[in-house]
Image (cartoon, coloured by chain):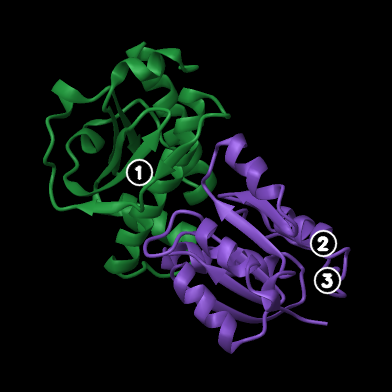
Amino acid sequence: MERNLERALARSVVRTFEDLAFLMPDDDLDPVQSNAKWVGSAEVRFEGFFSGRLILSIYGPEVLASAAQNMLGDITTPPLEVQWDTLKELANVLCGNLLPELAGREAVFNLHPPELLEAVMWDANDSAAGRIRLGLDCGRIEAFLFVDNESATSGGEA
Amino acid sequence: MSLNVLVVDDSATMRKMIIRTLHLSGLPVGEILEAANGREGLLMLTKHSVDLALVDINMPEMNGEEMLHKLRSNPTHRNLPVVIVSTEGSSTRINALEAQSLVRFVHKPFTPEQLSRVVNEMTGGAYGEESGTGIGEVSGPDF
């Protein structure tokens, strides 16, 4: 179950970054990507068929700058404020892509507006229902899915 | 005939992407207005005349569904074509939205061609391609 969920999470991350930011994440991380420093995280909370939250974290400043630049079609690197907004929108689209894949297209969810997290404040290894790490440029992406009632996902498609 | 458009999305990044897509769509875009939530969007409509609204669903203060409800209860805007632009993936909710008159849904991210097709379907082709900038000629990136 967890492996299926993580496969769905990885597919959704790849699709989101390819479609929205024209970047291609890879699950084969090199040492530079593995050691890249945390830049920021955005969280999307949701309720509905099941409830929980999704967190998207970016490691390596070039990753977020490239995503923002590509999304906006800008020649220069967008200011930090715009990059944070980009991170929130990536998390929002990721959550929108992921939930139907887990619960089926008829399931209804209410997504809250995405919020930036001040720091890495969770113990992902203990409590995340699913976690993935993908390499990208000189950094990496990590995504975590936390489900309030994990049994709710067992009836889904994952 | 130019198309005046209201773009309602709480993400400034997404509004910029939508506007870029509009310009790539081949539609005869005129004035473009921006609002960060449904309440701001309704306020804009009291001050400006628009031909089309592109509205996100998940927004703070007033979401897109509530904005749409208030829009339709106002006789002035009852017939304004509205395209819901959202990450929404539930067919149940999408079908309910599209069951309303002059409401269509496009999933983020979307292409200029998808946007153009939806707008022309809603308006009976009233805003066909601008001469010399046909949809088939658009070579910009998808959004």
Secondary structure at badge 2 equals: helix
Asked whether the viewer can see residue B138, the reply is: yes
Question: On the image, which quarter does residue B44 sit in?
Answer: bottom right
Q: Nearer the viewer, mark 3 or mark 1?
A: 3
x and y percentages locating residue A158 in the rendered image: 45, 17
At 34% from the left and 58% from the top, the residue drawn is A65
**Residue B37, placed above or below residue B109:** below
Expressed as whole percent of the image width and height from the top left, the position of residue B28 reads 77, 76
Give a yes or no on whether discs 3 and 2 share a subunit. Answer: yes
Q: Which mark is residue B120?
A: 2
* Chain B, colour shown: purple
Q: State which chain disc 2 sits on.
A: B
What chain letter is assigned to the residue under label 1?
A
Residue placed under numbered mark 1 in the picture: A137
Name the spot of residue A36 as percent of width and height, x first.
19, 42
Mark 2 and mark 1 in contact (Cβ < 8 Å)?
Answer: no
Q: Is residue A22 left or right of residue A152?
A: right
Amino acid carrying label 2: it is: Asn
- Give residue A8's quadrant in the image: top left
- Residue A38 against residue A128 in the figure, above or below: below
Cα distance between the residues tagged 1 and 2: 40 Å
Q: Residue at x 50, y 81 (%)?
A: B43
The residue under label 3 is: B127
Image position of B55 (left or right of A135)? right
State which chain is coloured green: A
